Amino acid sequence: MISNIKLIKFALCIEYNGNNYHGWQKQKNIVSIQEKIELALSLVANHQVRVTCSGRTDAGVHSIGQVIHFETYAIRKEISWLLGVNSYLPNDIVILWIKQVPMYFHARYCAFSRVYRYLIYNRSFRSAIFINSMHYIFHNLDIEKMHLGGQYLLGEHDFSAFRSTGCQSSTAFRNIRKLNVMKNNFLVIIDIEANSFLYHMVRNIVGTLIEIGLKKKKKSWMKKLLKSKNRHLCGPTVQARGLYLLQVKYPSYFDLPS
């Protein structure tokens, strides 16, 4: 009897290219990443599997470090799970690691921060290679002003000004721990770490930073926007294709791979 078999829990880390999917969450009549993951896991487990993720990503958003958990009665070695699930996944989704975790582990609620990275190809002409994996800005960006402008957002604040319509969170308060803007040749890298994020929060912040980088606004404009709590005053929502869920951080006692 299956009721006599011990239920166990696993955490997984997933990398995916979001261009061909309507986001993480499984919904009717769309192709989602969750759907593909659950199907592959169910085939290896030989029973229906449901997964919970650290945080849903929108259509077109990529991941290098999405973390999920699932429960199963199936007894498999970790390497068997890894190789088996990857064999059933499409080429634009891959499991990076899998680890058995305590039953109290929760991919969303046990995480203490998430790190997103936004990539901008900043050159006078577009890239043929990275057209679907980066945002493209024609004019030269002032990286120093963008970085300094972003520092106004550090700490816990009401981020209503960067919260898009449709956000279902009960509160707009979030805590941004780090925000760094860097440049390497033609590549602009924007890293933002926070306890969690509102709907389109990262993309709205990046759109605002770009306005500062283009010298349309002063870096102190960011502080005024934050105090205004008015979404209509800040920069545009940038394209999803430049956004990556880079890492989800958990307490060290779970001993998850980095």
Image (cartoon, helix red, strand yellow):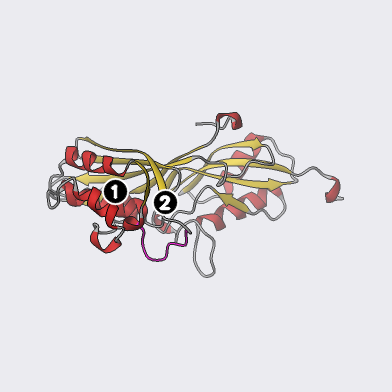
User: From this viewpoint, is residue 249 visible?
Assistant: yes
Q: Secondary structure at mark 2?
A: strand
Vertical side of 7 occupied by 49: above or below: below
Give the x, y percent position of residue 160. Answer: 35, 57
User: Total label count?
Assistant: 2
At 32% across and 53% down in the image, what residue appears?
203
* Magenta: main secondary structure: loop
Say which label, 1 or 2, has the lower sequence index.
1
- Between disc 1 and disc 2, the foreground one is 2
Between 109 and 83, the one nearer to me in the picture: 109
At 71% across and 39% down in the image, what residue appears?
76
**Category of crowding for the residue at label 2, using alpha-carbon neighbours closer than 10 angstroms: few (below 14), some (14–19), many (at least 20):** some
> What mark, if any, has residue 194 been given in the picture?
none
- Three-letter amino acid code at the position of disc 2: Phe
- Left or right of 246? Residue 3 is right
Q: Which residue is mark 2?
A: 173
Vertical side of 150 occupied by 216: above or below: below
Which residue range is magenta in the image?
A: 163-169
Vertical side of 151 occupied by 42: above or below: below
- Left or right of 198? Residue 129 is left
- Left or right of 175? Residue 131 is left
* Residue 37 on the magenta segment: no
Between 86 and 100, the one nearer to me in the picture: 100
Q: Which residue is mark 1?
A: 134
At 68% across and 42% down in the image, what residue appears?
9
Q: CA distance from mark 1 to mark 2?
A: 29 Å
User: From this viewpoint, is residue 131 visible?
Assistant: no
Give the x, y percent position of residue 146. Answer: 21, 42
Q: Residue furthest front?
A: 227
* Residue 164 on the magenta segment: yes
Give the x, y percent position of residue 6. Answer: 79, 42
